[in-house]
Amino acid sequence: MLTSGKAVKVTLYLSDGAKYRGVPVYTSILDFLFHSGIAGATVIKGVAGFGAAHRLHSAHILEISDNLPIRIEFIESREKVDEVLGELERRAGSGLIEIQETTVIVPGQDAH
């Protein structure tokens, strides 16, 4: 359980067309985080974006793209992030992982 105080925010930047062992990479990562005991995670699908290859991807009314940007975010203790980071790197493939130090407040708990 995440408590108030120092924590780490992890953001993964992916493409929704990317696969890991035959399933969408974001599904694989979310399942992994859930079964690893991460406090919570959110998957956000973008409507447009581009990555390192500088190819613009966007959703149009008449066209559904499978290369739209996906962002997964979660906040956890540094120790828990260190436990899962190696597997996140394997599953993210050509994606990008950002890690930021942060402070969280969980209502009803005293900050440390």
Image (cartoon, rainbow, N blue to C red):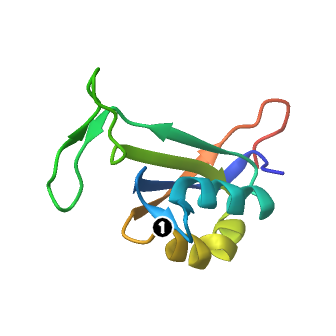
Disc 1 secondary structure class:
helix
Residue at 60 percent of width and 53 percent of height: 27
Characterize the local packing of mark 1: few (<14), some (14-19) or many (20 or more) Cα atoms within 10 angstroms: many
In this rendering, position of residue 102 left or right of residue 70 = right
Residue at 50 percent of width and 74 percent of height: 89
Residue that sits furthest to the left in the current view = 54
Viewer can see residue 104:
yes
Q: Quadrant of residue 30?
A: bottom right
Viewer can see residue 37:
no
Q: Amino acid at mark 1?
A: Ala
Residue at 48 percent of width and 67 percent of height: 92
Q: Is residue 92 above or below residue 104?
A: below
- Residue 22, given in percent of the width and then of the height, sits at 55, 66
Q: Is residue 86 above or below residue 16?
A: below
Disc tally is: 1
- Residue 81, given in percent of the width and then of the height, sits at 64, 67
Q: Nearer the viewer, residue 106 or 99?
A: 99
Residue at 76 percent of width and 50 percent of height: 39
Q: Nearer the viewer, residue 104 or 92?
A: 92
- Residue 28, given in percent of the width and then of the height, sits at 62, 60
Residue that sits furthest to the top in the current view = 61
- The residue under label 1 is 92
In this rendering, position of residue 25 left or right of residue 62 = right
- Residue 77, given in percent of the width and then of the height, sits at 69, 60
